Image: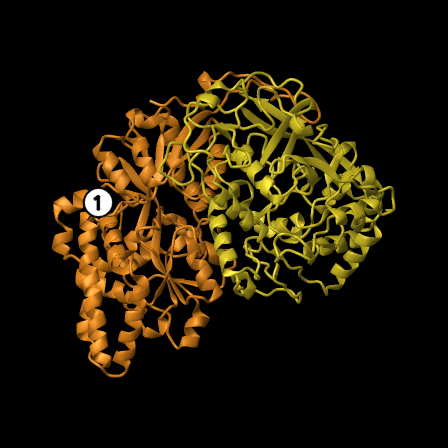
Amino acid sequence: MQSNSHDAGRRRFLTGLAGVTGALAFGKAYAAPRPVVVMTSYQGEVMDRFEAAFERAHPEYRLNILWRMPHDALPWLEKPEQGGVDVYWAASPRNFERLKKEGAWRKLGVDSAGLTDKIGKNRLADADGYFRATEMAGYGFAVNTSRLAKLGLPVPADWNDLTAPKLAGLIALPIPSRVGFAPVMVDIVLQAYGWEKGWALWSEIAGLSVLVDRGSTFVTDEIASGRAAVGLSIDFFVASAIANGSPIRFVYPGHGGINPGQIAITAGAPNPDGAQAFAAFVLSEAGQRLLADPDIRKLPVRPAVYAGLPADYPRPFVAAERGAYDYDESVGLNRLTLLGQVFDAMLIRRHGELVGLWQRLHTAEAAGKDMSAVRRELCTPPLTELEAADPALMRLYRDKVEGATTAPGDVEARWNALCDSHIARAMQGLAEAVA
Amino acid sequence: MKRSRWLGLAGLILIAPVLADDVTIADASREAFSQPMSGLSETELAAFMRGRTLFRQAWVVSPAQDIAAGLGPLYNRLSCIACHAKNGRGQPPETPADRMQSMLVRLSVPGVGPHGGPNPHPAYGDQFNEEGVPGVPGEGRVNLRWDEKVVVLADGTKVSLRQPRLVFTELAYGPLDGALTSPRIAQPVYGSGLLDAVSESTLFALVAETKPDGVKGRVNWVWNAAKGGIALGRLGWKANMPDLRQQSAGAMIGDLGITSPLFPKQNCTPAQTACQQAALGPQPELSTAQLNDLVAYQAHLAVPARRDTESPAVKAGEARFAQMGCAVCHRPTLHTDAKAADPLLAGREIHPYSDLLLHDMGTGLSDGRPDFMASGQEWRTPPLWGIGLAGKINGKVFFLHDGRARNYEEAILWHGGEARVARDRFAKLGASDRMALQAFLDSL
C-alpha cells in the first residue's frame, strides 16, 4: 500500500514562525486536520468548491485530491487497500461496478433520507448499498437559435430532427472514442431507436457534422460563435456557459439519458470516518446546492434541492416522469467502449468522405431520385446487435473505460474492411444515380 | 497565413460603445477574461485551444497513462486554472482556517541566490508547497490571519485596513525560522502577451521621464533561463520574470511541480529525500510543444474592452484619477514593440494602466523580501485593465499582492512611498469624488 503523505500522525508537527510582521501562531493548541484522500476526475471548479465547503463544514478533516481519469483511476484502486484512497468520486459507472465485484468498496452507510434510488430506468443507488449517485448530467443539444432561424429550421426536439440536410456542416459532434462523455450519447440513440435505425441516424448526423476532438474547441465555442447551429453535448458544459453569459440554449431531447456521478468509500479506507463525512456532505442539502454553482451546473440527486433552484434550472425528476430518461445505462455499461470503436470505424475514420457522400445523397434525393440503396450502404453498421452482444467480443472491450486508448486489432480491421466496402458501394450507387 | 475573424461568444454581447479591436473584446460576461483575440489565424486559434486545455488540465501523479502526468512531487494546486480562476485574479482564504486555494507564499533566506535572485530556503526552496504526492510529505500548512487598523479620511469616513500574518503549521522539513516570506495571490492572465511585447526602450524612456510627486520607477533586472543571462523583468508582482514563457514554465515547476525544457529539474531541496526519490515519468513532463501552446493561450487571451466610458461619473472619475497623480504610474497607454516576435501583438497601442516599473510603495506594503533588484518595498505597478469586471467574474475581489484590500478604497489607502502623495490626495476627496473614481475603475 502506498503510504499516505498527508497522514498527520506521521508528519512532524511543528508550528513554524514566519511572516511579514513577525512570528505568530494559532492561539490555542493546534490539532492537524486528518486527511481524506479523494480520487476523482471532476473538473477543477467542482473540486475547488467542494474542497472549500467541506473543510469549512468539517475542519477536523482536510481533503487530499488525487485526480485521475477513469482509465487511470482503475489500476490505482485495484492496488492493495485501494492505494490509500478513502473515497472514489467520479462519473464512471463502469469503474464503480467493476470495483464492487472486486470487493474494493465498503458499504456507504450514509443516511438516505430525502434521496431517491431511481430516476427513469436508471438506478441512483447501488442495490447492495456500496455506492450512490451524487449528481447527474443529462445529454442533449446546445443550440444557436438565431442560426437555426436563419436556416428556417426549428429548434430540434429529438435526435431525428438532426438529419435535416440544411444542417450540413453545422452540427458539432464530439468524437465518442476521444471525448469522455460521448459514448453514452451513442448508446442513448441506439436504445431509443433500435440498433439499425440508431446507427442509420448516427451515420446521417455524422455526415452533417464537424468533429470536435479532445483538447480542441469546445462545443459551446462552436455554437456561440455561430460556426455550428447545434452541438451534441452533456448538459453541464452548456449550462455553465449559459450561466456565464453565453447566448446559447440547451435542449433536452425527447429521448434523453443521464450519466450519474457516483461516490464510494474504499474497503481499505485509511480514514473511513472522514470518508463517510465527505460522502454525507456531498449528498447533503448544502453539498447538493453547490452543484448549481454557475461554474458547475450539474443536476442534484436530492429532489428537495430543486425547490430552491431558479425556475429555469432543469428538473430531471419531472422529466423522468414523462419518460425522458428511459435510457437504461445498465444495458450500455459493458458496450460503451465497443460502441466508440464501431463509431470510429464507421463514421470517424473516413469522415471527410462520409460528409461528401451524404451531401451528394441529399442532393440526389432533393432531385427526386430514389437513393434508398445508397442509404442502406451508408447506414449499415459493421456488425449486428446480436454480434455486438457476443460475450467474447464484449470481453475485449468492457474493461476499457473512459479515456482508454485501444490499438487497432483484428476486430477493428474487420470492421474497417466492412465499412470500406459499404462506402465503396455507396460511391458506386451515387455515381450510377447521377449518371 | 489565413486569418479568421474569430467571433468569440462574448463578441455577441456588446455592452459598451467601445470599439473592440482584434486584441480587445467587447464582453462583460463572466467569460470576458477567457476569450481569444479575434485576430488569430486558424493555426494560432488551434494552438490557443490546445493551450486552454493544458491550462485547465488537472495534472496527475506519475506513473499514469494520462498525457498530463508528473504532478509534484511537491506542489500547490493541480492545475493552472485552480489559481487563475476564469483567467482572473486569485484571492486569499476567507477565514484563518481556510486553505490557500489561489495564492501562495514565496520563501527565501537573506542573501543572494543563484543568478542574483532570491536565496532559496535550504530546506523548503523558494516557494511553500503545501501538497505532496503519495509518499512525499507536503511542506506543511500556512494560514492567514489579519490585523486590522482604522484610517480616517478627511470627511470623517472610517476605513478599516487589514494586514496579513502568516501562520505556518505541520512543517515537515524543519523550522522556518528566519525565512523571508511573501504571500501572493494569482495575477490575471489576460493581456499578458501584450505586456510581454512592450519594448525595453519604452520602459527605459518611462524610467527617464521626470515625474511629479517624488515618483521614480525603475526596471528590475532578472535571470533569463532560456538565454542564460540577465534580462529586463516585465511580469510578476515584482517584475521578476523576463517574459511570458519563463513565467509559464516557472509556474509549472513552482506551483505544480511540472518540469519543462526551461526548468528540467524537479523542485526538491536536498533536505527533501522522499521528494528526490519519488517515481518520475518521462521527462520533461511538459514538452516544448505543450509549453508553446500554454504560452500561446495566455498571450492571446483578449483584454476586455472598457464599458460605460461616456458616463459622466466615469469621465469625472477618470479626471480625478489623472489629477491625483495615479496615472503617473498606472499609465493609461503604452505601445508594444513594433518588432515584437508575435505580429498580432506588435506595434499596438494598449491601455493596461501600468508602466510595468518597480516603485517603492512604502513600508506598509513591504514584504521584506528582495527579488532580484526589487526591494521588499518595491512592487511592479499592477495593470488595471479589466479590473472593473473582477468582481463579476471572480466573485469577491481582493487587491494588492496579498489580497489584503477588499475594495479599491483600501487598495489606494495602502499606497505609500512614491505613491504617498497620490494616496493623501485620495484621502482628502469627498464621497462623490470617491464614487466617481470607483465608477471609473469599474469601467476598466
Image quadrant where one finds the C terminus of chain A: bottom left
Q: Where is residue B410 drawn, in percent x and y?
A: 73, 42
Q: Is residue A73 above or below residue B393?
A: above
Q: What colour denotes chain A?
A: orange
Q: Quadrant of residue B187?
A: top right
Asked whether the viewer can see residue A248, the reply is no
Res B390 seen here: yes
Give the secondary structure at mark 1. Answer: helix
- Horizontally, is B113 left or right of B128 in the view? right
In the rendered image of the structure, the colour used to display chain B is: yellow
* Quarter of the N terminus of chain A within the rendering: top left
The residue at 14%/50% (across/down) is A389
Q: Nearer the viewer, residue A237 or A180?
A: A180
Residue located at (23% from left, 41% from top)? A399
Find disc 1 in the rendering and name its residue: A397
Report whether B419 appears left or right of A149: right
User: What residue sits 40% from the left and 50% below the top?
Assistant: A298
Tell me if residue B86 comes above or below residue A232 in the rendering: above
Q: Position of residue A360 (x, y in %)?
A: 29, 75
Q: Amino acid at mark 1?
A: Tyr
Identify the image quadrant of residue B254: top right
Q: Is residue A120 above or below residue B105?
A: below
